[in-house]
Structure formats: C-alpha cells, structure tokens
Amino acid sequence: MISLFSNKIILIAAVFQLSFSAFSQDQDFQIWSGAEVKYKWSKKWSFGLEQNVRSAHNSLLVGKTFTEIKVNYDLSKKMSLSGGYRFLQLYIGEKSMGHRLFADFKYSYKLDRIKLRYRLRYQYQTATEKASRTFRNQFKIAYNLPKTSIEPFLAGESYHTLYRGFEKYRVTVGLSEKFGKKLKGSIYYRFQREVNYSNVQTQNILGVNLAYNLGKRKKKKD
C-alpha cells in the first residue's frame, strides 16, 4: 500500500513542477533525505539527533548536508517547547559552513482521526559570512487512514525575516507510515518559492525521512 501512495506523491510532484514552471524565473528540482533518532528521557523531556542530505542543480550535485540536535519539553498534552542547534555544510560555490540556533512553540489538536498542528519557530543562522533572523509559521493537517498507520498530510509554512519581511513560503503534501513500534517513514513533495527578490528562486522537492524511536529511559529500581 505504501508503494501505491508513493507513486501518487511522485505524480503530484511532476504535476506541480509543470504547473509552476511558467511563474518561476529560476527553478530547481531537489531531493531531500533525512534520518533521525529520538530518545524519551522522561515524561516531559525528549531528545533528537538528525542527519540530512539535500541535493541541488536538478539533483546532480550535493548542495547541503547538516547535523541537528534538539531537545523537547512537553508543557501539556497539546503544547510543547523545543530548541536546538544545526551544523551546516554548504557545497554550492565555495564550500562553507554554517550554524543555526532555533526555538519552537508547538500546539497540537486531535479530532478523531484528524490531527492539527501549529508551529512557531524563531531561528538565528550564520552562513557564508551572513547572519539572518527568521520567524517561521507552519500549519499542518494529517489524517489517519482507518485500520492502518498511514497518514496523508498537508502543510504550509511562511518565512518572515526581521529586515526583509515576508521572504519565502512552502507547501508540502505527503504521507507517513509506522513500521512497527519504533520506526516511522515519510515521503513528500514540497513546493518552495522565494518572494521579494529580483531573481525569484523556486524549488520542487521530493523528500524521504526515516525516524527511529529508541524508547523511554528505564527507571532504576531501588
């Protein structure tokens, strides 16, 4: 069943790429892949370690890799705070490194099989001798298909910098599925476009992610 949905996502990606080609001055097809390990330290605290590779120039070259570590604190069943650090390596042009610090607020709501989530992120990033401060607003809706662990999802996100204002937006459609209790995979198509630039950059992205949950920390017995 997962292969059937994967074919649909790839078809959607092709349709979107053709649909938006007339409106973009500079397009790029990219493949994003990531793997994450999660660990539940306590009822409220959890940690994550993630590695990602992103292609560029129509997926002919590696454009960026990054390693990210983050910590999450659950305020309640619906709200949480998280923060983290990302180390980036950029390969397009002159090879360089970058750093990102970020803080998130998340609010989640579940209505039967429908899951809604809002995330507000503030990030500070330095790369290629430039620094940026960005606020990101993300809305996501997912639906759990009956008698399966498959969840189609749709998400939208906007980027606002302190100096430029509205800078970029993303629209993502995909699906996720659990494989057992600890492994979860997702595949998605993402349309990403800059605004307020003279040379508008547009990316059509096919992404794959895997997340492995190490489980909860075992409490020591007295």
Image (tube, helix red, strand yellow):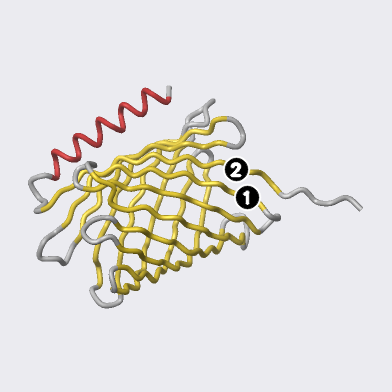
N-terminal label among 1 and 2: 1
Residue type, numbered disc 2 = Asn
Residue at point 55%, 64% (across, down): 81
Answer left or right for 47 relative to 120: right
Label 2, on which residue? 213
Tell me how far mark 1 sits from mark 2, CA to CA.
6 Å
Q: Is residue 20 above or below residue 100?
A: above
Q: Residues within 10 Å of mark 1 (few under 14, many from 20)?
A: some
Q: Is residue 58 left or right of residue 182?
A: left
* Residue at 57% across, 56% down: 78
Residue at image location 27% in from the left, 57% down from the top: 169
Disc 1 target residue:
39
Q: Residue furthest bottom?
A: 163
Judged from the image, the secondary structure of the residue bearing numbered disc 2 is strand
Amino acid type, mark 1:
Tyr
Looking at this view, is 215 or 2 the one in front?
A: 215
Q: Answer whether labels 1 and 2 touch (C-beta < 8 Å).
A: yes
- Image coords of residue 122 (percent x, y): 41, 69
Say which quadrant the N terminus sits in. Answer: top left
Count of numbered labels shown in the rendering:
2
Q: Is residue 155 left or right of residue 107?
A: left
Q: Is residue 221 above or below residue 18?
A: below
The residue located at (40%, 68%) in the rendering is 123
Which residue is more in the foreground, 25 or 106?
25
- Estimate the x, y position of residue 69 in percent, counting from the top left: 52, 58
Q: Looking at the picture, does residue 200 appear above or below residue 22?
A: below
Q: Position of residue 6 (x, y in %)?
A: 35, 29
Q: Position of residue 51 (x, y in %)?
A: 45, 49
Could you say whether the residue bearing mark 1 is in a helix, strand or loop? strand
- Quadrant in the rendering for residue 209: top left
Disc 2 packing (10 Å; few <14; some 14–19; many ≥20): some
The label number, if any, that marks residue 222 in the structure image: none
